[in-house]
Amino acid sequence: MFDLEDRMLMAELTFSLANLPTIDQMPHVCAGCGQVVTSKHTFRLKVHRSYPGPDLTATVAGFSNEEQRNWHQFQQLFAQGKCVVELPVCWWHRWIMPTFIGIKSMTEHRVSIQGLADSFVQEMKRRGWSDI
Ligand SMILES: [Zn+2]
């Protein structure tokens, strides 16, 4: 049911960090497989410590003071664990089989999540949540 071919059909979605949707603003479909869910279980995607960008100490030298301050606030955001994206998932994907949902890329302004069900992504785009 969830073989490799299914995984290759998985889609991506990019959110603005300044405008992350809440779980109530998401469609009633599983973010992992796209089936309709009647009661929302949530999958918490914590993005702190996941920033894969250049090492701060290696890049901060060339930045202006303001850029350094923004960087600091960015680090604080994640250090405090505030940046948590909650996604609706079905019972199966919540309790039996973990989804392959993960962070694909990240900047100061947006985060791209991969491994999402295509129908979930389409519905989120229709609602205007995609930041591309
Ligand atoms: Zn599912």
Image (tube, helix red, strand yellow):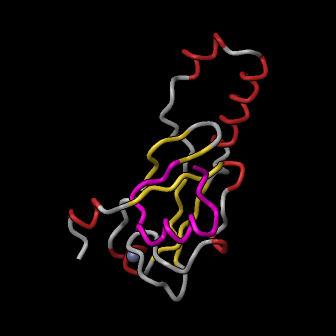
Answer with left or right where residue 50 lies relative to residue 34.
right
Work out whether residue 127 or residue 46 is closer to the camera in this orientation and state it: 127
The quadrant in which residue 21 appears is: bottom right
Work out whether residue 65 or residue 43 is closer to the camera in this orientation and state it: 65
| Highlighted range, magenta | 112-132
Residue depicted at 68% across the width and 15% down the height: 63
Answer with left or right where residue 57 lies relative to residue 70.
left
Counting from the top left corner in percent of width and height, residue 59 is at 58, 16
- Farthest residue in the top direction? 61
Counting from the top left corner in percent of width and height, residue 6 is at 26, 67
User: Relative to 97, is 37 above or below?
Assistant: below
**Total number of numbered discs in the rendering:** 0
The verdict on residue 125 being magenta is: yes
Counting from the top left corner in percent of width and height, residue 71 is at 68, 28
Residue depicted at 49% across the width and 65% down the height: 121
The verdict on residue 115 being magenta is: yes
Answer with left or right where residue 29 lies relative to residue 62.
left
Judged from the image, the quadrant occupied by ligand 1 is bottom left
Counting from the top left corner in percent of width and height, residue 37 is at 48, 84
Residue depicted at 40% across the width and 69% down the height: 32
